[in-house]
Image (spheres, helix red, strand yellow):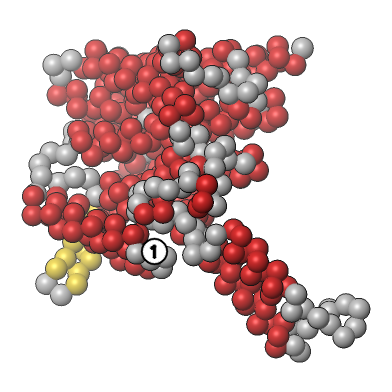
Amino acid sequence: MMQGDVTANNTKQNLPGPPISLEVFQRFIHKAASGSMPLFSAAVLALVWANISPQSYHDFWSTNTTLEIGNWQISKSAAHWTNEALMTLFFLTVGMEIKREILVGELASFKMAMLPVAAALGGMLLPACIYALFNHNEPSIKGWGIPMATDIAFSLAVLAILGKRAPVGLRIFLSALAIADDLGAVLVIAIFYTASLSISHLIVGLGFIVCLYVANRLWVRNALVYIVLGVGVWLAIMGSGVHATVAGAIVAMFIPAQGRYDTDTFIRTAKEKLNRFECIKTTCKRTMLLDQNHLESVLDIEMACHNVETPLQRMEYSLHSWVAYLILPLFALANTGLVFKDIDLAAALTQPVTLGVTLGLVLGKPIGIFLFTLLAVKVLKAHLPSGVEWKHIVGVSMLGGIGFTMSLFITGLSFSRPELTSYSKLGIVTGSLVSAAGGLAVLMLTSKKTEA
């Protein structure tokens, strides 16, 4: 958050201040929830493919592809390209969502952020402790971060089933909680899932980050500049030992959150151009091909729209469909494949990894979220959102146990042994399904009681 971003709450800057408008928030909720169906479909397809033809599934995602420029080359499997390259764009969108929430959303002030941040903290600490309890002194202890994350797409999609019966404030709370949770997951990956560091690569990456900072300070609004510098950050971080996807979240912090025009300038410019529409007859009808002034006015208005829109908004909007409908489904397809015939289900369900992940999601998440929310209200004097009661918090805390995308991602960082990966995936699927069903049941019951 550089340059004008830091002054986003300054009244002179004409940026909308918190709270974010209900219409904008509902669009965000719809976009987030709509991405759950492709993700769910891809996960089911991966399970079917892996069990019908495990060899072809393994061979496909193990196929190496090489990117070569002169003497420089990177060779990785299809699964690694998905997890380290495409998922960087997912982390970029996550980073932009976090930045937007910090600037103008539910995390824009300490008072507003207290509740969701406290809830997210509790929802991360207790699951990690439960996992550590089952895996203490075991090689699998490295997976303590797996049950910490909430999948925003699935959790909001389940909540959306309730429709208007769920208070809007509850959706706002869950989305802010999940975004704060994502921020925590990014920090955990960057700090704790780095095996070794290459100082030289980190220095190169820092150089690109400084260039991003300078571009932001100089009011550079061309997205191509940030894309080129972002690729440089990604390559440097990939070589440093830190997981390459963290580059996406870093770059997001430097994407400008102000346009070339403020809102007043845009309104004045648009009105001036609209006033040029003068027609001889009572209606203009189809004049674009006949009147050059009309065409030029339209192009000028289009340019004004481009100038008032912030690069942060433009990039987030442009990337969302790619992430929701292509990148995340590909990630699920590459990582959800669990071959059931290779494991003894009865024995697998009692393994420390499976128990740690499942109970971390089913018990750790709801207890941690509810307890820390209660502490924030009682000790820090935070307030529950409008229309939200404690019975709603119980249900939404259970939905917090839907950990899919980030949980699978951290699984890949935690384990190299196939059996541990399988146990973790089994725990993620089991825990997420139980959390979704339990949270939905509680919220449906509480909604009926509220309506009565």
For the C terminus, the image quarter is: top right
Q: Residue at x 19, y 24 (%)?
A: 140
Q: Residue at x 36, y 23 (%)?
A: 121
For mark 1, give the secondary structure.
loop
In the picture of the structure, the residue carrying the numbered disc 1 is: 219
Q: Look at the image and tell me whether residue 383 can be seen.
A: yes
Rendering coords of residue 199 (x, y %): 8, 50
In this rendering, position of residue 441 left or right of residue 361: right
Residue 46 placement: quadrant:
top left
Q: Look at the image and tell me whether residue 49 can be seen.
A: no
Residue sticking out furthest to the right: 282
Check the image and report above or below for 295 versus 114: below
Mark 1 is surrounded, within 10 Å at the Cα level, by few (under 14), some (14 to 19) or many (20 or more) other residues, namely: some
Check the image and report above or below for 397 versus 87: above
Q: Nearer the viewer, residue 286 or 54?
A: 286
Total marks in image: 1
Q: Nearer the viewer, residue 283 or 27?
A: 283
Rendering coords of residue 151 (x, y %): 44, 34
Q: Residue at x 55, y 67 (%)?
A: 306
In this rendering, position of residue 227 left or right of residue 257: left
Q: Residue at x 16, y 65 (%)?
A: 73
Rendering coords of residue 92 (x, y %): 37, 50
Rendering coords of residue 12 (x, y %): 51, 51
Check the image and report above or below for 155 versus 82: above
Q: Amino acid at mark 1?
A: Trp
Residue sticking out furthest to the front: 12
Check the image and report above or below for 86 versus 53: below
